[in-house]
């Protein structure tokens, strides 16, 4: 495919923040559109938007987009041509002149224009025979709930099936029942949700785990589908530099500070008591040895803040974890993302795609997860942008 037209426009993500959308037209008659999630924390190798979005749109339409015209792209390896074209305008390591979101959004759009009927997953891997399971966020706390309520950031379920329709159906039922059960105990709850659209009660962490465990087991039996539990502790938000500060620890002691050793012991206890199959960021981002201590069983110990989608950081600590959260927008290059995934798969580390806290409506992350054969993908549930990505997995499954 030869690129015949490339243009940018300003759109808005689910939080109403300005982001960029790229539209690519090829000589094959296809039009591809792409936008990517926004990194609200900017804890990435690249800058998302180093300038105002209006300036970036103008710069793309007047200069960058024209440089892309007549580039011939036939397969994923040809994306090197696209990234070289961007480097004409930005030679900084962190893309601080044009922004990583512009590059990724352009690459998304090109992938769609290249793919027959827009089926990017099939284009990337026409012979694929694997499909990811989904990790779904049901209850939220921590920063996602503005620092109110639960200490842990996400209480997760993992339906152990590649039948995505059954997974969503089970998750929706669990969400409904959790809302009902929480309402019986938290009279001011009123089905409150955080900005990630997860249920957001003001209760103890243990209480929520107990309820989620009970509800999940009941739904599991009714739907005839195995469902395990998981946690995103987001321990960075609990760490004060010396201790882990809890505000919802137990009925006897709601506020409690744990040492590093006590935190590891606490995480192991939760894993055992609730048969947790997945735990993400159980310790602060520099405690690699602590992660290694926890990584001694069959459960999934995933690093998000620990690795922050950085290949070199993963290489330096690959034996400390067995799974890593990958957020494509954090690297400003799909080629680098693919390199990171390939490294994980060759070294028995599970790569897991995840949403960001600044989601766009683009659902291509579902295609990338399937096309590159990631074993798991982490997506929320309630909310149009999240359900859009889950529903896209249903369509992809049908097309295979």
Image (tube, rainbow, N blue to C red):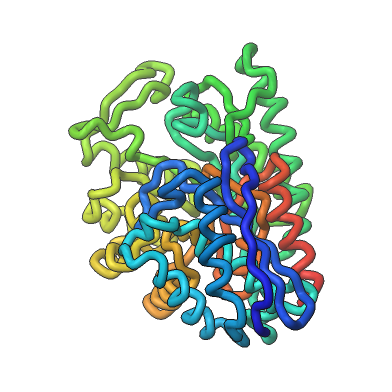
Residue 285 is situated, as x and y percent measured from the top left of the image, at 29, 48
Residue at left 68%, top 26%?
Answer: 181
Q: Residue at x 40, y 42 (%)?
A: 41
Report how many numbered discs are placed on residues in the image: 0
Q: Is residue 56 above or below residue 203?
A: below
Q: Is 396 positioned to the left or the right of 311 in the image?
A: right
The C terminus: image quadrant:
bottom right
**Residue furthest to the front:** 62
In-front residue for pair 337/201: 337
Name which residue lies at 60% across and 86% down.
Answer: 72
Please indicate, yes or no, whether residue 286 appears anywhere in the rendered image. Answer: yes
Residue 275 is at least partly visible in this image: no
- Residue at the image point whose x is 77% and y is 62% from the top: 394
Specify the farthest residue to the left: 242
Picture coordinates of residue 86, whole percent (x, y): 45, 70
Q: Quadrant where the N terminus lies?
A: bottom right
Q: Which of 253/289 is in front?
A: 289
Image coords of residue 78 (percent x, y): 53, 84
Rendering quarter of residue 113: bottom right
Q: Locate residue 341, reporting x and y percent.
A: 45, 72
């Amino acid at each position: 495919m030869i690129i015949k037209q490339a243009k940018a426009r300003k759109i808005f993500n689910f939080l109403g923040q300005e982001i960029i959308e790229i539209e690519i037209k090829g000589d094959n008659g296809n039009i591809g559109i792409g936008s990517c999630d926004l990194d609200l924390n900017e804890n990435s190798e690249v800058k998302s938007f180093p300038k105002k979005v209006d300036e970036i749109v103008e710069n793309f339409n007047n200069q960058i987009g024209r440089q892309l015209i007549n580039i011939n792209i036939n397969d994923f390896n040809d994306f090197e041509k696209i990234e070289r074209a961007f480097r004409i305008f930005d030679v900084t390591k962190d893309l601080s002149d044009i922004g990583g979101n512009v590059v990724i959004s352009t690459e998304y759009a090109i992938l769609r224009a290249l793919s027959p009927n827009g089926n990017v997953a099939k284009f990337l891997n026409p012979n694929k025979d694997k499909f990811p399971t989904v990790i779904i966020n049901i209850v939220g706390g921590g920063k996602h709930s503005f620092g109110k309520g639960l200490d842990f950031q996400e209480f997760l379920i993992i339906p152990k099936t590649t039948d995505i329709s059954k997974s969503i159906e089970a998750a929706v039922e669990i969400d409904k029942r959790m809302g009902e059960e929480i309402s019986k105990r938290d009279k001011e709850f009123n089905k409150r949700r955080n900005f990630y659209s997860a249920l957001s009660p003001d209760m103890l962490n243990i209480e929520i785990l107990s309820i989620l465990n009970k509800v999940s087991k009941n739904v599991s039996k009714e739907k005839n589908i195995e469902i395990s539990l998981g946690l995103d502790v987001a321990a960075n938000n609990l760490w004060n530099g010396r201790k882990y500060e809890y505000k919802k620890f137990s009925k006897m002691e709601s506020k409690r500070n744990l040492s590093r050793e006590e935190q590891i012991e606490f995480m192991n206890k939760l894993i055992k008591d609730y048969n947790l199959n997945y735990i993400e960021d159980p310790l602060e981002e520099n405690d690699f040895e602590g992660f290694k201590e926890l990584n001694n069983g069959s459960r999934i110990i995933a690093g998000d803040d620990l690795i922050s989608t950085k290949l070199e950081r993963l290489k330096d600590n690959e034996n400390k974890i067995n799974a890593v959260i990958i957020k494509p927008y954090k690297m400003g290059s799909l080629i680098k993302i693919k390199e990171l995934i390939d490294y994980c798969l060759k070294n028995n580390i599970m790569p897991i795609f995840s949403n960001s806290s600044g989601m766009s409506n683009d659902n291509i992350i579902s295609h990338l997860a399937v096309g590159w054969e990631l074993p798991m993908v982490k997506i929320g549930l309630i909310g149009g942008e999240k359900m859009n990505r889950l529903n896209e997995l249903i369509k992809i499954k049908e097309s295979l």
